[in-house]
Image (spheres, grey):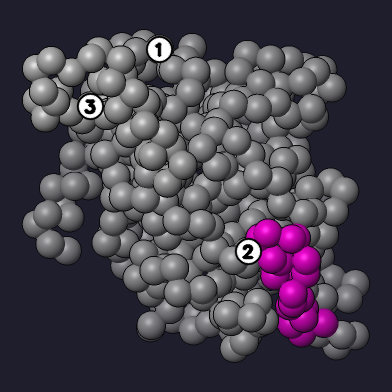
Amino acid sequence: MTRTEERLIDALGAVGRSVRQEALPPLPGHCPAAEPGRWGRWLAPLAAAASVVLVVVLVGALHLFSGRPPGGAAIGPPPRYYVSEQAMSIQVRDTATGAVTASLRRPFSGPRHFGMYANVVAAGGGGDREFVAEYTGSRPHSTVTQTRLYSFHVTGAGRVAGLALVKGGRLGHFTGGTALAVSPDGSQVAAVVYRTVGLQGPRPLPQIMVVNLRTGAHSLWAGGLQRAGLYLSIPSISWGPGGRFLVFLGQWCHAWLLGEICGTGPHFSQVRTLRVGPGGGRLSDGSALLSQSARYAYLAQALLSPDGKALTVVALGPAGLAPDRSIPQNFRVVRVPLRGAGAARLLYRGVLSNDPYVFLGSDASGRHLLLSGRLNGWIDHGRLRLLASPVGGAFTDAW
């Protein structure tokens, strides 16, 4: 680990402990417009004020239509294809049309093998169109489950190539969770897993397993975050720069949805860091970056930006806490800076008509965000561009 990476990890923890949500300025209703620049000194002293206004408007329009964000490079179009886990199977779809271009066969399905089903899929590091899929299954008439990881590529024509079990991809007697992430260099995979128990056993606690794809070694983090009378879930996970630490969202609640997602009612949520190394440890070994507050009443998802400077969170509003799940639930996708530079920025505002069942994904650049679950689309300058999905929505999308 370099000295810079060490300082970055320490700084993230320090910032997380110092940030106060109530001190942040109010969220704007839309993304801030680009600064037009100092054209005034280029204009002749006798230029009309109307000309100045016209130049400012034209510059702002150029930024808007070129897709250039304030202070950054132009955002290009999203990847041509995305990978979607739907109905416990994995499909490759065309982003523009929604057409299915390929489907993954379920590995090791048959009367003498595990009946595998897809849990979740994640994009490989570096945006090279490599993906990792997690499959869980059990032998016929058995309650013992096993989980395995497979990698594959999506070709320029939207086809699947090279589907194979990754090195260290047999995770043993664990059930896969709802969160999976590949390190920036593609050498490690982090998965939320549950140790297999019998049908009458207690509800298992989530754990985080890291698989080194070069050596096949496993490291496991478990325990330390239990709260009396509450269940723990980990619905999202992401990597820090350099692949030296993880950021995950912990939720504590009384009621569950789909076995692993906190439902409505009393709960607590917190975004935490976890330093990655051989041997594993406890989930509590890291520090808190962002906690539930009046500003963020329900944190449903949280991803660290590729540069490690901000969190992108899905925050449900107070309506999301109503015990009647049929009540529409307002939610926001918000970029929250971690270094005190700038204010939180609203990226999208929407409504969920049912359970707080939403997942957040991103491409390698962090610029193209995906929403899946009850909603299924990508965020484009404050709008949701819908992606094709069957009734009930996609469980996870990746590109």
Instruction: Indicate the position of residue 154 as horizontal and vertical percent values.
Output: 59, 78
To which residue does mark 1 refer?
26
Q: Could you tell me which residue is drawn at 80 percent across and 29 percent down?
A: 354
* Tag 3 secondary structure: loop
To which residue does mark 3 refer?
340
Mark 3 or 2: in front is 2
Mark 1 or 3: in front is 1
Q: Is 152 placed above or below 222 here? A: below
User: Is residue 98 in sight in this rendering?
Assistant: yes
Residue 104 painted magenta: yes
* Badge 1 or badge 3: first in the primary sequence: 1
Q: Could you tell me which residue is drawn at 49 percent across and 12 percent down?
A: 294
Q: 362 or 117: which is nearer to us?
A: 362
Q: Residues within 10 Å of mark 1 (few under 14, many from 20)?
A: few
Q: Is 47 placed left or right of 142 in the picture?
A: left
The amino acid at mark 1 is Pro
Q: Residues within 10 Å of mark 2 (few under 14, many from 20)?
A: many
Disc 1 to disc 3, how far (Cα)?
15 Å
Q: Is 118 placed left or right of 245 in the picture?
A: right
* Tag 1 secondary structure: loop
Query: Where are the magenta residues, as a range?
Result: 90-109
The quarter of the displayed image where residue 358 is located: top right
* Badge 3 or badge 2: first in the primary sequence: 2
To which residue does mark 2 refer?
82
User: Is residue 229 in sight in this rendering?
Assistant: no
Rendered-image quadrant of the N terminus: bottom left
The amino acid at mark 2 is Tyr
* Tag 2 secondary structure: strand
